[in-house]
């Protein structure tokens, strides 16, 4: 144990770009020269005057290979303190290490980072790039997005391979999303395009850029990127389906279906391909054909593909509704509920189909009660439960649900209309009218 009673606050906090430089510094300046009797593997002795050596991965939020040195009180400690302090260059001492926390000119920012990280040196150690990336990540997490973007571009320029590993280039997507949310579409576009310069052996950057263009109504740009990606990855099902959807958006359904057909002939039997083809056929009101492809897709799904399976069942149910095959539609939706009992969208589809189309009020009530239990604050759910209760002549409960719907959505005309109908029924106790307006339409 150290006797700390005589220790003063003589301390140096030094910054290093990599582990080796830090280790070499410690061996050279803070350890005694090994004597003849010391053997390899023996823990080296600290120099007289050194009280504590501490290694840190950050200092006050600034990442790096940090070294904290505390010195003993007395002449030896003070002498060593002065000696070590002179060895450290000014920019390597904690108080002087560059770490931008306020906006500054991009040109100056680049110069400072060049100096700090020695970006033009031929050093091959990956350590400094890890530190630089951690700093960039810190800036982004603290909403210093411009700094993060400039820093990431410097890594892209000087060491692009570093960004490929562990998908570090994904930070560009986060930056693009930030700019998109701020309404700065041009900046977002520049950021989302950057991973393409890495020549990554993946379709992902192309698909991300296509999605960006589609969201912002730039379908022609999306088409060009998708076309290039299709030439590069002709057998990738995501690329094939992406280009088919883009073509359909451009109203070129014939070419979209042709691309999907070509992929089938090339031996692609992925359920996503069948799902996409079925959806395009359904858009064209060719639901009998669409159903065949949805069923093919379901046969190809694995047990682990729950999300894709539910999407295919949902598409299949919609096609049955289009064909007015409501019994088949509800059986399909019920399969979804068995897989995901809290799926509110498909619970609503079930309730609506049973109530409005099949007039099966008991089944509508069964699923409606599940729905309202999961989301008691939805006015449209209470409205629907009010209608179901009214048709079952449960006028007290119907009134409760309709007033709850009114409380959640004041002055909605359909709710007011049904409340008037309810009052009229309570006065006359006449038979249910069997026809109501759908609040969802």
Image (cartoon, grey):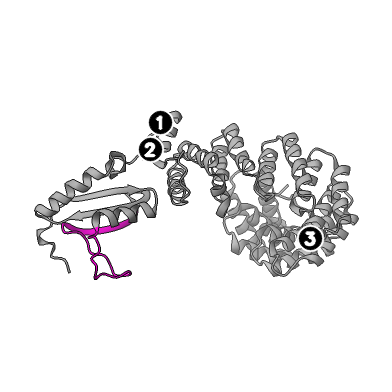
Q: Which residue is mark 1?
A: 104
Q: Which residue is mark 2?
A: 100
- Tell me where the magenta segment starts and ends, as one range: 31-57
Nearer to us of marks 3 and 1 is: 1
Element under label 2?
A: loop
- The answer to whether one can see residue 366 in this image is no
C-beta proximity under 8 Å, tags 3 and 2: no
Distance CA(mark 1)–CA(mark 2): 8 Å
Query: Residue 417: x, y in percent?
Result: 69, 47
Which quarter shows the N terminus? bottom left
Q: Which of the two marks, 3 or 2, is nearer to us in this view?
A: 2
Q: Residue at position x 32%, y 69% from top?
A: 40
Residue 434: x and y, percent? Answer: 79, 57
Q: Which percent across, then down, holds residue 172? A: 56, 43
Q: In the rendered image, which quarter is residue 224 located in?
A: top right
Of pointers 3 and 1, the one earlier in the residue sequence: 1
Residue 68 at x, y = what percent?
A: 26, 53
- Label of residue 420 in the image: none
């Amino acid at each position: 144990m150290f006797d700390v009673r005589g220790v003063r606050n003589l301390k140096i906090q030094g910054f290093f770009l990599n582990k080796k430089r830090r280790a070499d510094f410690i061996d050279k300046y803070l350890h005694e020269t090994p004597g003849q009797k010391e053997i390899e593997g023996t823990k080296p002795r600290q120099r007289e005057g050194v009280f504590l050596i501490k290694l840190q991965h950050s200092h006050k939020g600034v990442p790096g290979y940090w070294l904290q040195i505390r010195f003993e009180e007395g002449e030896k400690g003070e002498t060593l303190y002065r000696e070590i302090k002179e060895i450290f260059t000014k920019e390597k001492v904690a108080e002087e290490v560059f770490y931008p926390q306020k906006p500054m000119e991009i040109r100056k920012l680049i110069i400072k980072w060049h100096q700090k990280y020695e970006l033009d040196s031929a050093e091959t150690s990956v350590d400094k790039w890890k530190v630089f990336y951690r700093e960039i990540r810190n800036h982004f997490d603290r909403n210093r997005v411009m700094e993060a973007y400039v820093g990431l571009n410097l890594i892209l320029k000087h060491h692009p391979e570093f960004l490929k590993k562990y998908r570090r280039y994904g930070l560009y997507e986060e930056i693009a999303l930030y700019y998109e949310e701020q309404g700065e579409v041009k900046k977002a576009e520049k950021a989302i395009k950057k991973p393409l310069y890495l020549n990554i052996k993946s379709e992902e950057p192309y698909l991300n850029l296509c999605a960006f263009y589609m969201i912002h109504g730039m379908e022609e740009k999306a088409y060009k990127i998708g076309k290039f990606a299709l030439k590069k990855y002709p057998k990738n099902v995501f690329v094939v389906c992406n280009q088919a959807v883009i073509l359909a958006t451009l109203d070129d359904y014939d070419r979209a279906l042709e691309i999907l057909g070509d992929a089938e002939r090339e031996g692609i039997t992925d359920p996503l391909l069948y799902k996409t083809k079925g959806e395009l056929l359904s858009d064209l009101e060719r639901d009998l054909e669409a159903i065949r492809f949805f069923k093919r897709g379901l046969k190809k799904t694995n047990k682990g593909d729950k999300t894709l399976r539910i999407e295919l069942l949902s598409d299949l149910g919609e096609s049955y509704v289009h064909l007015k095959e409501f019994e088949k539609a509800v059986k399909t939706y019920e399969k979804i509920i068995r897989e995901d009992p809290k799926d509110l969208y498909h619970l609503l589809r079930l309730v609506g189909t049973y109530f409005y189309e099949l007039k099966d009020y008991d089944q509508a009530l069964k699923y409606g009660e599940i729905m309202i239990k999961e989301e008691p604050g939805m006015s449209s759910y209470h409205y629907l439960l009010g209608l179901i209760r009214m048709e079952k002549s449960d006028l007290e409960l119907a009134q409760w649900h309709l007033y709850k719907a009114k409380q959640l959505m004041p002055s909605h005309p359909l709710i007011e209309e049904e409340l008037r109908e309810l009052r009229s029924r309570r006065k006359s106790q006449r038979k249910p009218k069997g026809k109501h307006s759908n609040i969802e339409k």
